[in-house]
Amino acid sequence: MANTLRNIGKGLARGITADVLGMPVDTLNMLREGLLSPAAGGNPSARVLGGLLGPVQQTGSGDWFAQQMGLPQGEGMAYEAARMISPSPSDVMGLLRRAPIQEIMTYHGTPHRFEPTPENPLGEFRASQIGTGEGEQAYGHGIYLAETPDVAKQYKETLSDSTLMVNGKPFVQGATDTETAAIRSIAAQGYDNAIKGANQMLEQGADPTWVKNYMEDLKRNKGKSIEWNTGGSLYTADLPDEMVDRMLDWDKPLSEQPKEIRALINKTKSMLPANSLDDLGGDLSLLYGKDVTPSQFLNTWEALAGFRGAGEKALKEVGVPGVKYLDAGSRGAKEKTTRNFVVFPGEEKKVKILKRE
């Protein structure tokens, strides 16, 4: 019951209509009016609500509930609706004690437009289409999502049939390779991020002469209108927070993963292909040692099993739904970091598409 109430709350907070939740709008409104109206003072459920609200707030309000849940004012309607259908004071009190529900809005840029399905007119993610976008799959085998729309837009624009426009005119090729790179970088990530990336190149040992010319080309094009006139689609999708909590952190070795995740990883030992121990020279630490990175873990699993996505499949079966990793703009940053996510095959149905641009 508690999960059901929380899901209803999440849905209403996100603006989803009552019929999507399987509840007629009239029924929802009737519950609200009946249980929160002062005229329902004799109703046992109304008395429960009245007792929780206290002597002053007898009829309740979205703002009051928002305050109780630590949310901004005006966002309490979801919790108000959840309390309206709660069958007992204990369910209501349990919801009041819970922390606010965190919505993880993510973005997916693609050259494709998903076909509508009976479940969602905007379409759904399909494991069978993994690899048909960029195809690199550098952070694991799965469906890639970004925490920031700019990252997803970059993939949409890069992968789609596009025309790069500079001050309203098509840009084809610069006089030098650094000029072309500068124009494309500004279009993809903006001038400030492009300069930041150039400085990171120097720190990482890139050719200083090339980077110097590249930075000069960036500065020459500062302030120009540079953008892609592109096709493709940008999708906004709801990634359940409970999935994120159980994801493998790509930027940490196995020993630094949360205790619960380490326990799940260890469960995959019983799923290793036959002769794996022999292939590892009798040393399981090559796969499960404290210094092993997620990249090494997945690559080794793939080599042992002989097929792409073997490690991801094993992790999914023990309860690890994917990978999370810092995006390019956040690596080395100390604050305001943002991430990308990889949802393993078999988990994609849990990610709901909310919007297409």
Image (spheres, rainbow, N blue to C red):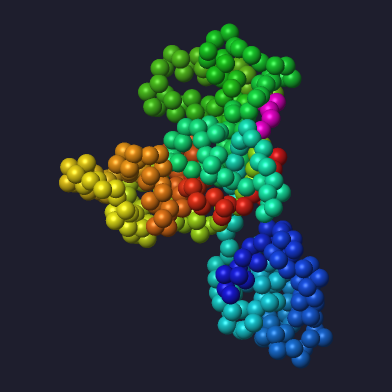
Q: Position of residue 182 (x, y in %)?
A: 56, 20
Does residue 64 sit above or below 139 in this rendering?
A: below
Which residue in the rendered view is the most extreme toward the bottom? Answer: 42
The part of the chain drawn in magenta is: 228-232
Q: Which residue is more in the foreground, 245 or 275?
A: 275
Q: Which residue is more in the foreground, 126 or 63?
A: 126
Residue 136 seen: yes
Is residue 112 located in the magenta-colored stretch of the structure?
no
Q: Position of residue 195 (x, y in %)?
A: 53, 26
The quarter of the image holding the N terminus is: bottom right
- Overall secondary structure of the magenta stretch? strand
Q: Which residue is more in the foreground, 318 or 94?
A: 318
Does residue 50 sit above or below 215 in this rendering?
A: below
Does residue 200 sit above or below 301 in this rendering?
A: above
Residue located 41% across and 49% down the image: 313
Residue located 57% across and 73% down the image: 2
Q: Position of residue 305 (x, y in %)?
A: 33, 42
Residue located 59% across and 41% down the image: 108
| Quadrant housing residue 319 | bottom left
Q: How many marks?
A: 0
The quarter of the image holding the C terminus is: top right
Is residue 230 located in the magenta-colored stretch of the structure?
yes
Which residue in the rendered view is the most extreme toward the top? Answer: 175
Which residue in the rendered view is the most extreme toward the front? Answer: 274
Q: Position of residue 44 (x, y in %)?
A: 70, 89
Q: Is residue 16 left or right of residue 214?
A: right
Residue located 63% across and 22% down the image: 222
| Quadrant housing residue 186 | top right
| Quadrant housing residue 207 | top left
Q: Which residue is more in the foreground, 24 or 325?
A: 24
Residue 333 seen: no
Q: Is residue 244 left or right of residue 66?
A: left
